[in-house]
């Protein structure tokens, strides 16, 4: 499990929910899992798999550093649509002042195209975008 990005994200999310105490990770396990997730995210080349990681953050259960690294990896591999950038900026704003300046810069860059697309003032775009690709054959 510790070497599969999606399985580890799923388990990390599950651990953040109420699990039986006999199954619960120790703080050290949680820290090791977060470190492993960061390494796996940085090596991932599939937008679909990175999108799966974001899906497991639906209750804000993944570490902010992991979600931030996931978006940054998506952008590095070429995912650069307005909705993704808008969701990322709003995610950063939810998590405190450390990333406000970065978020505000992204919002300045995407405001005009987001308004043209009709998503700037949308009540809810979804917590994170969902990415699709053809399954491997």
Image (tube, helix red, strand yellow):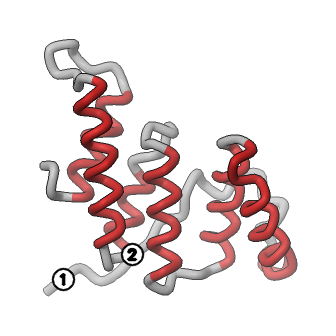
* CA neighbours of label 2 inside 10 A, class few (<14), some (14 to 19), many (20+): many
| Residue under the point 37% across and 26% down | 17
Residue 78 spot, x, y in % from top left:
49, 86
* CA neighbours of label 1 inside 10 A, class few (<14), some (14 to 19), many (20+): few
Which badge, 1 or 2, comes first in the chain's sequence? 2
Instruction: Give the spatial CA distance, label 1 vs label 2.
Output: 13 Å
Q: Which mark is residue 77?
A: none
- Look at the numbered disc 2 and give the secondary structure of its residue: helix
**To which quarter of the image does residue 128 belong?**
bottom right
| Residue under the point 29% across and 83% down | 134
Please state if 96 lies on the left or on the right of 21 as rendered.
Answer: right
Front-most of residues 27 and 87: 27
| Residue under the point 49% across and 50% down | 65
Front-most of residues 92 and 19: 92
Residue 103 spot, x, y in % from top left:
74, 61
Please state if 27 lies on the left or on the right of 119 as rendered.
Answer: left
Residue 97 spot, x, y in % from top left:
75, 44
Q: Are marks 1 and 2 in contact (CB under 8 Å)?
A: no
Q: Which mark is residue 47?
A: 2
- Look at the numbered disc 1 and give the secondary structure of its residue: loop
Please state if 90 lies on the left or on the right of 34 as rendered.
Answer: right
Please state if 52 lies on the left or on the right of 20 as rendered.
Answer: right
**Residue at the top extreme, as displayed:** 21
**To which quarter of the image does residue 135 belong?**
bottom left
- Is residue 67 placed above or below 84 in the rendered structure? above
Quadrant, the C terminus: bottom left
Residue 50 spot, x, y in % from top left:
38, 66
Q: Which residue is mark 1?
A: 136
Q: Nearer the viewer, mark 1 or mark 2?
A: 2
Q: How many marks?
A: 2
């Amino acid at each position: 499990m510790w070497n599969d990005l999606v399985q580890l994200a799923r388990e990390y999310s599950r651990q953040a929910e109420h699990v039986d105490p006999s199954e619960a990770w120790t703080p050290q396990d949680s820290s090791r899992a977060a470190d492993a997730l960061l390494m796996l995210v940085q090596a991932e080349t599939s937008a679909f798999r990175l999108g799966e990681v974001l899906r497991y953050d639906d209750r804000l259960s993944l570490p902010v550093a992991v979600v931030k690294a996931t978006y940054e990896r998506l952008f590095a591999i070429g995912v650069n649509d307005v909705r993704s950038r808008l969701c990322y900026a709003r995610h950063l704003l939810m998590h405190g002042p450390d990333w406000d300046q970065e978020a505000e810069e992204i919002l300045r860059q995407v405001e005009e195209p987001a308004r043209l697309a009709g998503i700037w003032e949308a009540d809810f775009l979804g917590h994170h975008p969902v990415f699709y690709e053809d399954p491997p054959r």
